[in-house]
Image (cartoon, rainbow, N blue to C red):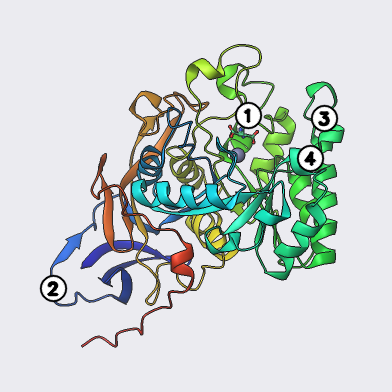
């Protein structure tokens, strides 16, 4: 297969032919090679590396009514996301080896894009050994901070070089339900210190302020960070009500604006969505659920920030594809468009502006804090390992096309064809 169009090659846009064989990019050339060409060289269209979302909740199991691996990965494909990494706060919780194996079975039978799985902090150390065979990492929630085995578990992860992702909100600092920035700072400092001591690969997710991002830095690459589109664009002064409720909460306007203004300059590694679907009923009321879907709005929002000159195209690809690939240890086969890498691509059509319309979402959660916000362009199609999984609103592969990214970790780039 050969596709032609304006593609982002590292930080440059070039008009090229991308040759794809068996799922791998085997050649990139300015001249048309022989063979049938799929044409994307149209005004406004740009070919980007497929996005990688380090923080999503695919739900499924007993919460399939909120989302399942089919609707969740279809939502990803519709958002130009080729890899999702799934959180373990499932029902039942994904912190036992038997549940992890069941999760893999469900994911592999339903997913249409590739996926990674995080494992939860197990209650017993008997449930620790070997989890890394199916999971790319472990997720630590505030409720796990006082787990009596936490030190042993972190040591295990450090020794095996397993990625450890932390939701940083210190519960001891969250009195009477107030989730303040100081509880975020406290948790960041505590885990950063542990990571330095143990040599742990630590990823601090959904940071809500510039200070948090600077605080997380160690000067080494073993501690990485992400923030989410909602912390960049929404704030607690202007955006109130059930559709904006999320953990950690939106911050005041000055904190939010400074995050947006500094997004390029601050040492942020990644953007994730924290795609956390709930039904509208579940969000209602005073004790309604925190979280909302994000997979179908993240890339359009980032492309809107590109149009507003707040980000370059490379910033978009770096934060939502290249660095996430590196954090997962997959950057030699993913994250950029070049020969020797897997053909995970998204064709984005920059033409036009569209209001976000949750009623048309692929996710089961038909609501969004970005409802009605105008975004630039839309995802035209998404390619995973050389296959069109999504074109113009429709899925083009069967459930179960997606594979666990653990299976990609061993895959080595094919020898690059010399072209003839
Ligand atoms: C998360 C969810 O719904 O799973 N919600 C959220 O607001 N991010 C859980 C959580 O992290 O509290
Ligand atoms: Zn989450």
Query: Which quarter shows the C terminus?
Result: bottom left
Contact between marks 2 and 3 (CB within 8 A): the answer is no
Contact between marks 1 and 3 (CB within 8 A): the answer is no
In this rendering, which labeled residue sits more in front, label 1 or label 3? 3
Q: Position of residue 321 (x, y in %)?
A: 49, 58
Q: Is mark 1 within 8 Å of ligand 1?
A: yes
Question: Which mark is drawn over residue 174?
Answer: 3
262 lies left or right of 91: right
Contact between marks 2 and 1 (CB within 8 A): the answer is no
Residue that numbered label 4 is attached to = 184
Count of residue discs: 4
Question: Which mark is drawn over residue 35?
Answer: 2
Q: Residue at x 13, y 73 (%)?
A: 35
| Circle 4 crowding by C-alpha within 10 Å: few under 14, some 14–19, many from 20 | many
The CA span between labels 1 and 3 is 15 Å
Q: Position of residue 294 (x, y in %)?
A: 49, 36
Residue that numbered label 1 is attached to = 246
Question: Which mark is drawn over residue 328?
Answer: none
Q: Residue at the far front: name it.
A: 126
The CA span between labels 4 and 1 is 14 Å
């Amino acid at each position: 297969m050969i596709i032609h169009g304006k593609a982002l090659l590292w930080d440059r846009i070039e008009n090229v032919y991308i040759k794809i064989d068996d799922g791998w990019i085997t050649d990139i050339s300015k001249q048309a090679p022989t063979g049938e060409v799929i044409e994307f060289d149209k005004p406004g269209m740009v070919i980007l590396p497929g996005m990688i979302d380090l923080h999503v909740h695919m739900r499924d199991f007993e919460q399939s009514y909120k989302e399942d691996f089919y609707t969740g990965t279809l939502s990803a494909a519709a958002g130009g996301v080729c890899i999702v990494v799934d959180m373990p706060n499932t029902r039942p919780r994904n912190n036992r080896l038997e549940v992890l194996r069941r999760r893999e079975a469900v994911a592999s039978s339903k997913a249409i894009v590739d996926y990674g799985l995080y494992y939860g902090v197990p209650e017993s150390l008997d449930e620790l050994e070997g989890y890394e065979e199916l999971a790319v990492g472990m997720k630590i929630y505030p409720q796990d901070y006082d787990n009596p085995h936490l030190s042993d578990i972190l040591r295990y992860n450090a020794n095996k070089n397993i990625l450890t992702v932390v939701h940083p909100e210190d519960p001891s600092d969250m009195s009477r339900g107030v989730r303040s920035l100081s509880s975020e700072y406290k948790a960041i400092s505590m885990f950063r210190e542990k990571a330095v001591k143990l040599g742990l690969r630590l990823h601090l997710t959904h940071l809500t302020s510039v200070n948090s991002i600077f605080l997380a830095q160690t000067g080494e690459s073993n501690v990485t960070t992400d923030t989410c589109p909602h912390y960049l664009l929404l704030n607690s002064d202007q955006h109130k009500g059930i559709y904006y409720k999320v953990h950690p909460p939106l911050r005041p306007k000055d904190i939010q604006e400074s995050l947006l203004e500094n997004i390029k300059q601050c040492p942020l590694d990644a953007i994730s969505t924290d795609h956390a679907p709930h039904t509208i009923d579940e969000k209602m009321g005073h004790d309604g659920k925190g979280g909302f879907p994000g997979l179908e709005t993240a890339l359009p929002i980032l492309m809107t920030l590109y149009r507003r000159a707040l980000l370059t195209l490379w910033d978009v690809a770096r934060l939502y594809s290249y660095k996430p690939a590196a954090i997962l240890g997959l950057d030699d086969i993913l994250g950029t468009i070049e020969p020797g890498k897997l053909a995970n691509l998204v064709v984005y059509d920059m033409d036009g502006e569209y209001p976000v319309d949750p009623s048309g979402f692929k996710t089961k959660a038909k609501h969004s804090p970005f409802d009605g916000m105008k975004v630039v362009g839309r995802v035209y199609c998404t390619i995973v390992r050389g296959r069109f999984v999504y074109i113009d609103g429709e899925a083009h592969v069967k459930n179960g096309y997606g594979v666990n990214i653990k299976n990609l970790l061993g895959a080595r780039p094919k020898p690059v064809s010399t072209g003839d």
